[in-house]
Amino acid sequence: MVTSLAFLFRKKIDTASEFSPLETELEIVEAYIHIQKVRFATRIEYIEVILINDRTIQIPKLIIQPLIENIFKHAVNKMKTTCQIVLKIEKKENQLLISISDNGPGFSDDFVLTNSQGIGLKNIQKRLSLYYGNQASLAIQSVPFKKNTIQMNLPIETTRVTQNNL
């Protein structure tokens, strides 16, 4: 656990780049899950479904782990049964589809991302907009205690929006 904690801490304070390979982001998620399994043991079941071979694809740094962290904050802590967390990554045409699902309490019927009190989802949405403009998306589907999914669609091999070309 100490190794996972140290790895996670190093990656969070590393400001060398705003992007990292998908493989690195998956390692960060694994370290985070390892830490949480010590805490929650059998109350969580984590499943990865990675349907792409190229794990060198560059994605915004720390874009997946905060979504997993939200599940622990808003689902696992509130559940008495096992929370199943599924991370699925696939490529469709020129898009990288990253979805994180759980079987927790989900979002209220009147939840609107732009009006949300939480900073995690808003931060991710703003970062996607900053890096990709309208070529990326963040969507939420929620059926409480059945399947709640947050899906990010990121463009692959595209010009990123930067401060220089705004």
Image (cartoon, rainbow, N blue to C red):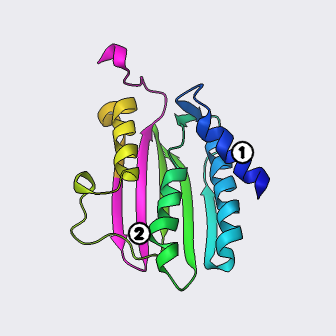
Q: Which residue is mark 1?
A: 7
Residue closest to the eye, 142 or 72: 72
Label 1: which secondary element: helix
Residue 131 found in image quarter: top left
Outermost residue toward the bottom in this view: 80
- Residue 145 covered by magenta stretch: yes
**Residue type at numbered disc 1:** Phe
Above/below status of 143 relative to 126: below
Quadrant of the rendering where the N terminus is positioned: bottom right
Residue 130 in magenta?
no
Residue shown at the point (35%, 31%) measured from the top left: 130
Q: Is residue 54 in view from this perspective?
A: no
Instruction: From the viewer's side, name the closer residue of 58 and 81.
Output: 81
Q: Quickly name the residue at label 2.
A: 148
Q: Is residue 103 left or right of residue 133?
A: right
Which part of the image, by quadrant, shows the C terminus?
top left
Q: Is residue 128 visible?
A: yes
Q: Tell me which residue sits at (41%, 25%) in the image.
A: 160
Camera-side residue: 87 or 80? Answer: 80
The residue type indicated by label 2 comes to Asn
- Callout 1 environment at 10 Å: few (<14), some (14 to 19), or many (20+)? some
Q: CA distance from mark 2 to mark 1?
A: 29 Å
Residue 125 lies, in percent from the top left, at: 35, 44
Q: Give the residue drawn at x 52%, y 49%.
A: 64
Magenta residues, start to end = 139-166
Camera-nearest residue between 68 and 10: 10
Q: 10 Å neighbourhood of mark 2: few (<14), some, or many (≥20)?
A: many
Residue 126: image quadrant is top left
